């Protein structure tokens, strides 16, 4: 397993010895220099070897397979539970790393996890090298949450340009995906969103929206279906596309059957979610 897992690293080492430089190695292997440098990173190699050791140890000591996965919060809430339930029935013990996208991507790159739920969005393609493959799962629309008595709540779709003077509730960190999409979309319309408060708690966000403090973008995955009862109107935004494209990311050369099983279970759950939304999967 280790030999197969690290084959590309050994190929790069051989090419470096032959070519004498990273630039020559990149040309001979048809890779970019950053990709070559990535293959030479001892931390990534050792991380992947540690994953193999963990999987073998669990199989020997407990008679179970081990898998480490990573996710960001809103995707994990609806996509992962049913998928992990299926793996548990098959005797796979899954350990989860939860964090925002930079944390998830770093865990994937360094070999801390074998599979990760990730997203990309308009204007920001996901920066993973050719060692990794993305398996699209679903499109997660970002919808406008505004007070039910807001003048624009009578519209079926709210033009983004008409929110030029609105106050917005944004995420607590600069990596918040809704904020980054909102900033991009507002720039397309020639204005900058005005932030009035920050929170990562969707319950708090909905409370302040219902109270008329501000408006906000919210992923469809974070909706409960009871927003109207709280005094919140949820509407699509008429303007640039607002969405996150959620995928399962894996090392292209992974030999973990459990990772492939989880990917298939995630795809099945994504289909159920999008069909419930009345749409079709990615």
Image (spheres, rainbow, N blue to C red):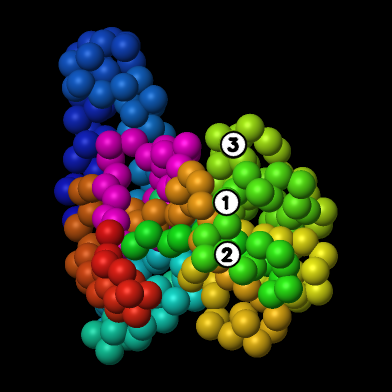
Asked if residue 268 is positioned above or below residue 122 in the image, the reply reads below
Q: Quadrant of the C terminus?
A: bottom left
Label 1: few (<14), some (14–19) or many (≥20) C-alpha neighbours in 10 Å: some
Q: Is residue 94 magenta?
A: no
In front of the other: 221 or 110: 221
Label number found at residue 221: none
Quadrant assignment, res 256: bottom left
Marks 1 and 2 close (CB-CB < 8 Å): yes
The Cα–Cα distance between marks 3 and 2, rounded to whole angstroms, is 19 Å
Label 2: state its secondary structure.
loop
| Residue receiving disc 1 | 159
Tell me which numbered mark, 3 or 1, is placed earlier along the sequence. 1
| Residue receiving disc 2 | 155
Residue at coordinates 76% horizontally, 47% vertically from top-left?
165
In front of the other: 182 or 47: 182
Label tally: 3
Asked if residue 71 is positioned above or below residue 173 in the image, the reply reads below
User: Between tags 3 and 2, which lies in front?
Assistant: 2
Residue at coordinates 56% horizontally, 35% vertically from top-left?
188
Image coordinates of residue 147 in percent, x first then y, are 72, 71
Image coordinates of residue 215 in percent, x first then y, are 71, 61
Residue at coordinates 32% horizontally, 26% vertically from top-left?
36
| Residue receiving disc 3 | 189
Region rendered in magenta:
109-137
């Amino acid at each position: 397993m280790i030999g197969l897992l690290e084959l590309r690293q050994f190929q790069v080492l051989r090419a470096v010895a032959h070519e004498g430089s990273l630039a020559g190695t990149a040309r001979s292997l048809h890779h970019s220099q950053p990709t070559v440098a990535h293959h030479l990173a001892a931390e990534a190699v050792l991380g992947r070897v540690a994953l193999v050791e963990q999987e073998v140890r669990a199989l020997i000591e407990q008679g179970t397979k081990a898998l480490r996965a990573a996710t960001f919060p809103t995707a994990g809430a609806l996509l992962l539970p049913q998928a992990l339930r299926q793996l548990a029935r098959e005797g796979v013990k899954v350990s989860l790393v939860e964090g925002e996208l930079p944390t998830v991507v770093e865990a994937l790159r360094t070999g801390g996890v074998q599979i990760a739920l990730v997203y990309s969005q308009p204007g920001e393609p996901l920066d993973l090298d050719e060692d990794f493959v993305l398996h699209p799962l679903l499109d997660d629309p970002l919808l406008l949450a505004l007070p039910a008595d807001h003048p624009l709540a009578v519209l079926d779709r709210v033009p983004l340009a008409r929110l030029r003077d609105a106050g917005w509730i944004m995420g607590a960190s600069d990596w918040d995906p809704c904020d980054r999409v909102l900033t991009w979309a507002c720039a397309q319309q020639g204005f900058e969103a005005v932030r009035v408060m920050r929170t990562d708690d969707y319950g708090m966000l909905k409370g302040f929206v219902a109270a008329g403090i501000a408006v906000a973008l919210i992923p469809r995955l974070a909706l409960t279906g009871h927003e109207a009862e709280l005094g919140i109107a949820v509407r699509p935004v008429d303007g640039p596309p607002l969405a996150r494209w959620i995928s399962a990311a894996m090392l292209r050369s992974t030999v973990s059957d459990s990772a492939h099983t989880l990917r298939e279970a995630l795809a099945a759950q994504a289909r159920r979610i999008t069909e419930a939304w009345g749409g079709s999967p990615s």
